[in-house]
Image (spheres, coloured by chain):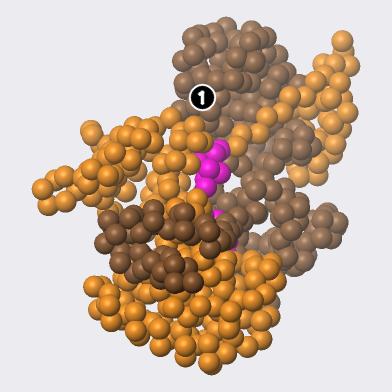
Chain colours: A brown, B orange
């Protein structure tokens, strides 16, 4: 999810950091994928220490320009510190979130499965249901309870659900206001008038539309990037994409004729900002052209 | 430079903060320009306090999603703190910089004027000359000394120049390596083989090409944005542009047929990551389709 856009953008050196297991090994699937994509270096380290190593560079870890990817609260703190040491990061990251917006057209078993797939991530996962009626809510919560019993990670999921909320919001405009205010990382829209709902979304990381679009499809196979803004940052950050690895430089070349046209404007602006040398940089050029 | 791309990007609320003078007034040119562009609100405050007000919101200052624009070290510190409170910023900012790369084809008086227009900004301005020979360097420095005498801000400029460097670098490849390592905010290229030099630049904020392209043209009139990365951040940040105000949301809608094709992949991936509920979100859908 991170190395592919980096390679597409033409990054010259792509490093991944991944924590080894107790035997000091990295899962072969990770190594195979890294080789497949063309990652230049795999560092067997994770956490804040990996962020520090890439920020400063060590004998074995290259110093890098951008550090991207999710992590726990220590990783997030380390990444924020790294921005003061010359490194760019993707975005601040918090616990993962899903918000499902459902009405009578939503299949309760599907919605319940989506809520639970977020809840199993960790006890700090954020799971929100916005439903059009009390009846819709009850049908979904009943399914949640039924499916929860079968999960091996049911204790984690149950603790996450205790911090979660279901909100009944019959008015569609108010429901959209609420969704945009919350700015969910993952937003699943399962309502009859899905086009109107989608058009009203301004703050979300990635949007999953309709009964057959589970969040887990985005995690693994639908093609969208799942490195997404959490904790309300979808208000002002985009998810990672090729653009995240592209840098833009601006260029200008002014001809002798061009500076004669633009120059006087620059002189007036600089003079009024009391920046005499700024003005003079144009004046010496205009004078030299006049003298020719 | 900041409000125009914000308006072009369709931002719904654009606020500018500007410090008033001792009489509590804002310069009419600022107010006129703000009205011309369509800025929604002008706040008479500057510095870290303005950043704080926009981060948290007050009775009279709106809470905003992005805080952009240069400032002194206190403003930079305030903006970095703001990123921990839900605000996005453009980039970390340091003192302004220019690097001029010159050879025999450069007009010494023009280069000197460009170096001085950066030096007059403040005593912490960074002014760097990379020249192809000792002779080129001496001719430019002689011009700097001559022009400096005439400036009203000559004391500031002289102090800035004391912290500045002129580097003789006859090998063009090494000169480019040095420039890319320094990653200047403003880069002026005045060499005979300008196309080769421009092609070799990977790290710079904005590039000014040829004898008739002073940096001050970029500040006021050439059309490029002058909110640019400083302090080496041109390695990993772009200057402000319309893109800086655009946010991207990804969308996906999978059909009943689509989930039957993609679903098994998701199930395998989720199973191997031991995320049973992620797998189940697909399984319940596939099962329901099979039962139909």
Magenta span = B235-247
Residue in view at x 32 percent, y 34 percent: B35
> Front-most of B222 and B2?
B222
Q: Position of residue B275 (x, y in %)?
A: 73, 39
Q: Which residue is under mark 1?
A: A179
> Up-down: is A209 above or below B111?
above
Residue B90 showing in the rendered view = yes
Q: Where is residue A70 in the image (x, y as percent from the top left)?
A: 61, 50
Residue in view at x 86 percent, y 21 percent: B257
Q: Is the magenta stretch mostly helix, strand or loop?
A: loop
Q: Where is residue A80 in the image (x, y as percent from the top left)?
A: 48, 57
Task: Classify residue B28 by image quadrant.
Answer: top left
Residue B244 magenta: yes
> Up-down: is A141 above or below B61?
above
> Front-most of B142 and B63?
B142
Instruction: From the viewer's perspective, tell me whether residue B143 is left or right of residue A19.
Output: left
Please tell me whether mark 1 sits on a helix, a strand or a loop: helix
């Amino acid at each position: 999810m991170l190395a592919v856009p980096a390679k597409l953008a033409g990054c010259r050196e792509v490093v991944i950091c991944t924590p080894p297991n107790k035997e000091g090994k990295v899962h072969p699937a990770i190594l195979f994928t890294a080789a497949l994509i063309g990652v230049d270096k795999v560092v067997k380290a994770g956490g804040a220490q990996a962020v520090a190593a890439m920020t400063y560079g060590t004998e074995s870890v290259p110093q890098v320009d951008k550090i991207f990817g999710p992590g726990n609260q220590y990783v997030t703190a380390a990444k924020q510190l790294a921005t003061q040491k010359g490194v760019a990061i993707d975005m601040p990251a918090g616990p993962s979130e899903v918000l499902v917006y459902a009405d009578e057209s939503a299949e309760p078993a599907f919605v319940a499965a989506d809520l639970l797939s977020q809840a199993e991530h960790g006890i700090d996962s954020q799971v929100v249901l916005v439903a059009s009626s009390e009846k819709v809510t009850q049908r979904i919560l009943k399914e949640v309870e039924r499916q929860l019993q079968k999960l091996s990670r049911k204790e984690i999921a149950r603790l996450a659900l205790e911090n979660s909320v279901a909100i009944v919001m019959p008015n569609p405009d108010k429901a959209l206001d609420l969704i945009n205010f919350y700015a969910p990382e993952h937003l699943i829209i399962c309502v009859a008038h899905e086009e109107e709902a989608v058009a009203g979304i301004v703050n979300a990381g990635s949007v999953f539309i309709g009964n057959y679009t589970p969040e887990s499809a985005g995690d693994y196979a639908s093609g969208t990037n799942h490195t997404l803004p959490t904790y309300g940052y979808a208000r002002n950050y985009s998810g990672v994409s090729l653009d995240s690895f592209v840098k833009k430089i601006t260029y200008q070349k002014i001809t002798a004729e061009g500076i004669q046209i633009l120059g006087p404007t620059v002189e007036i602006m600089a003079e009024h900002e009391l920046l005499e040398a700024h003005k003079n940089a144009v004046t010496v050029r205009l004078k030299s052209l006049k003298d020719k």
